[in-house]
Amino acid sequence: NKQIILKDYVVGFPKESDMILKTSETINLKLPQGCSNGVLVKNLYLSCDPYMRMRMTRTEGSYVDSFTPGSSTSHRLKLTVVTIVEAVSDLIFATLQPITGYGVAKVLESGHANFKKGDLIWGFTGWEEYSIINAPEGLFKIEHTDVPLSYYTGILGMPGMTAYIGFYDICAPKKGEYVFVSAASGAVGQLVGQFAKLSGCYVVGSAGTKEKVDLLKNKFGFDEAFNYKEEQDLDAVLKRYFPEGIDIYFENVGGKMLDAVLLNMRLNGRISVCGMISQYNLEQGEGVRNLLTLITKRVRMQGFIVSDHYHKYPKYLEMIIPLIKQGTINYIEDIVEGLENAPAALIGLFSGNNVGKQVVVVARE
Ligand code: NDP
């Protein structure tokens, strides 16, 4: 079993070398005793998601737990031994915990009444070839298999639900409204823009390369798009694209972009605070100066966590599956082959290397 393990808690910008690939020679493809309610799965596709950076930091009381680093105090000695004495590495390896995250997997053995051998699932799994999931209640069984399976890391999984809840529920869009989306070509952003067009809105997106800006306009149907890295004055560029102001801002990046948007919000505008990726690698977040607008323009700014809303997943599927099949919605993925390439893919999110949803293929079946 190959596994990706976080070496130690990360400070600042994460590096590929913060994670290591460990290989164990023997694989026991059986549910261990004492795990009678769990499932043993073969991981197929893993999802790289920006929130995983927060799990690389030692945090308490957050909505997600920190990863267990392989060389944290309790494990550092064992890891050293692994590198020195390969013969006992399997034994020691069993105590190391891989990174966990969303993925798509196939059930090999099940002790849980909801799952059986051969089922395909998406949900929380390990960054490894095979995982034992002790509490599989949180997993989603995949019923529609006539779409790419990898979509369950993106449009049919957590990012899809994020765009759906963050746009329709939090922003309550109305026809003709002016919508701005940051990190617009990513896993979530590309969907928000298309949902905005389906709602009859005018939508502009920002992204970090010319290729992404072209995709926004030509593949996802945004009315306008710009490369924020080429703009000195974000306030001026927003005024250019939104002479009458912004009704809805779908916030993915935070920092300077948020400050510029605040200066351009319209009366009774809504800001859906989905993420602030520009802040995740900072020890101390950048200050936001223009919050006064929330009062003067009566703006509602609301954060949300997608997993609070998973009860609406069946409703989302009802909407999105036909849109995919009719070709009304496009979805772009950035697919990397091999578990060993997962660390580079994950940290690439923070320099915008990914074009579309970042997926890692562990196995195709
Ligand atoms: P993306 O696929 O959009 O990948 C991240 C993108 O962010 C990069 O490609 C890059 O694009 C952009 N980016 C990276 N660093 C910066 C920076 N410093 N300033 C501006 N842009 C930057 O990721 P997702 O679609 O998966 O996630 C988008 C946002 O949604 C994230 O903030 C994430 O944390 C959040 N999220 C929140 C959830 C919730 O429940 N609230 C659930 C899922 C996601 P570019 O080239 O354009 O710079």
Image: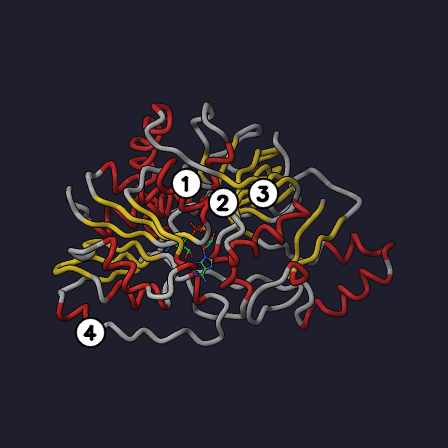
Q: Where does residue 7 sit, x and y in percent of width and height?
A: 67, 64
Q: Secondary structure at mark 1?
A: helix
Q: Residues within 10 Å of mark 1 (few under 14, many from 20)?
A: many
193 vs 225, nearest the viewer: 225
Q: Earlier in the sequence, mark 1 or mark 3?
A: 1
Tell me whether circle 1 and circle 2 mark residues in contact (CB < 8 Å). yes
Q: On the image, numbered disc 2 is attached to which residue?
A: 355
Q: Real-space Cα distance between discs 1 and 2?
A: 9 Å
Q: Is mark 2 within 8 Å of ligand 1?
A: yes
As helix, strand or loop, the secondary structure at mark 4 comes to loop
- Whether residues under marks 4 and 3 lie with C-beta atoms below 8 angstroms apart, the answer is no
Classify residue 34 as left or right of residue 113.
Answer: right
Residue placed at 37% from the left, 29% from the top? 324
Label 4 vs label 3, nearer the camera: 4
* Label 4 CB less than 8 angstroms from ligand 1: no
Task: Tell me which amino acid carries mark 2.
Answer: Val
Please name the amino acid that badge 3 sits on: Val
Q: Tags 1 and 3 in contact by the CB under 8 Å rule?
A: no
In the rendered image, which residue does mark 1 sit on?
215
One can see residue 135 in this view: no
**Camera-side mark, 4 or 1:** 1
Assign ligand 1 to one image quadrant: bottom left
For the residues labelled 3 and 2, the Cα–Cα distance comes to 13 Å
Q: Position of residue 216 (x, y in %)?
A: 37, 42
Q: Amino acid at mark 1?
A: Leu
User: In the image, which disc is placed on residue 360?
Assistant: 3
State the separation of the CA atoms marked 4 and 1. 34 Å
Along the line of sight, the residue nearer the viewer: 290 or 235? 235
Pair 3/2: label in front: 2
Sequence order check, earlier mark of 1 and 2: 1
Q: Which mark is residue 292?
A: 4
Q: Residue at x 21, y 54 (%)?
A: 242
